[in-house]
Image (cartoon, rainbow, N blue to C red):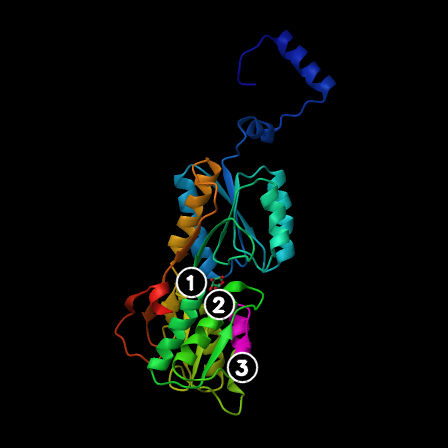
Amino acid sequence: GPRPVSPETRERVLRAIEQLGYKPNHFARALARRKTQTIALIIPDNANPFFAQLSRAVEETAFEAGLTLVLCNSSQDPKREVVYFSALQSKRIDGVLLITSGLDASQVHALVDSGIPLVVLDREIPNVYVDTVLVDNVSLGYAATKHLLQHGHRTIACLSGPSSLLNSVERVKGYKQALSESGIATDESLICCGDFTFEGGYSAAKKILAKDTRPSALVASNDLMAIGAIHAVREIGLSVPNDLAIVSIDDILLAKISVPPLTTVAQPIWEMGQTATRLLVDRIRGNASPTPRRIVLNGNLVVRESCGCRVASSATSSDIRATEVR
Ligand code: RIB
């Protein structure tokens, strides 16, 4: 098309195309270059601001490296992740960043065996030895609980994420550790399994509030569930923090505009997305060591009002070092 050729030549080429059934294949060009300059990010729930904020970090970092990003939302369904894996492989994606909703090692190995570089972030997958970026989730649960203990609370409920996820299990472990250090035995009836959503937090909090002996405080494993819990408390005419003090985890943008503003253990969302993307770019470009890297980042407690503290604006306590806190 763009290049000038004689009408006779053009005719001969068009005839050859027709006879051969030739179709231009854009992927062929990518295959020739053996790169599509595209990476994918698979997230569990694009309605959750945590993943929206993390996707921003990934996209910015990928763009700086000259790559485009394909965003896949698994809607918290591991089976959908498997469908995305095969679709991405057929599109010759250069690399995948995965936040899983519960895939096990055997399912992930299929992607690893395909040779496509994979970085796991936020939710570590047991027995999968690939580059991984996460936060020490035990220290997140520990720090949230510790702060409520420092307020003098002794009956503290815990709203966990899905029990199929290692980061949920580890946050509950941190909650139990903090209680035990204060000489408080864990009351399993105070631990409710949630799903990291507003609705899940709301319905779990209703169960907690209906108990004969109502707890005075709650650790929520993420901000969306904490906001759902606040809604449940206010719906029955009670108040946060006076009737139920709450500390959660994440520090999404909604945490500071919540009523009351959430005291929460902030995850380094941007740093996690940026670090994971840089690891993947290194892996794709052959600049990484053969042994997988495991990077553990730190959280930090952001004190606002849902715990009972009186602060003018969100003050940040010193960083909670994973090793120090535990
Ligand atoms: O809010 C979503 C939660 O799931 C976060 O705590 C994050 O760690 C993700 O795993």
Q: Is residue 206 above or below residue 35?
A: below
Alpha carbon separation for disc pair 1 and 2: 8 Å
Q: Which element type, helix, strand or loop, lies under badge 1?
A: loop
Q: Is residue 290 visible?
A: yes
Query: Residue beneath label 1, please?
Result: 136
Q: Quadrant of the N terminus?
A: top right
Query: Residue beneath label 3, please?
Result: 188
Alpha carbon separation for disc pair 3 and 1: 23 Å
Q: Position of residue 54 (x, y in %)?
A: 44, 54
What amino acid is found at the position of numbered circle 2 in the picture?
Answer: Glu
Q: In the image, is 239 to the left or to the right of 99?
A: left
Magenta stretch, residue numbers: 188-204
First in sequence: mark 1 vs mark 2: 1
| Mark seen at residue 170 | 2
Q: Position of residue 237 (x, y in %)?
A: 46, 87
Q: Is residue 77 magenta?
A: no
Are the residues flagged by discs 1 and 2 in contact, CB closer than 8 Å?
yes
> In this view, which residue lies farthest toward the left?
312
Q: Is residue 192 magenta?
A: yes
Q: Residue at x 39, y 54 (%)?
A: 270
Choose top left, top right, bottom left or bottom right for residue 16.
top right
Q: Residue at x 57, y 10 (%)?
A: 5
Q: In the image, is 84 to the left or to the right of 253?
A: right
Q: Which element type, helix, strand or loop, lies under badge 2?
A: helix
Choose top left, top right, bottom left or bottom right for residue 66.
top left
Q: Quadrant of the C terminus?
A: bottom left
Answer few, some or many: residues within 10 Å of disc 1's Cα (few below 14, many 20 plus, some between 14 and 19).
many
Answer few, some or many: residues within 10 Å of disc 3's Cα (few below 14, many 20 plus, some between 14 and 19).
few
First in sequence: mark 3 vs mark 1: 1
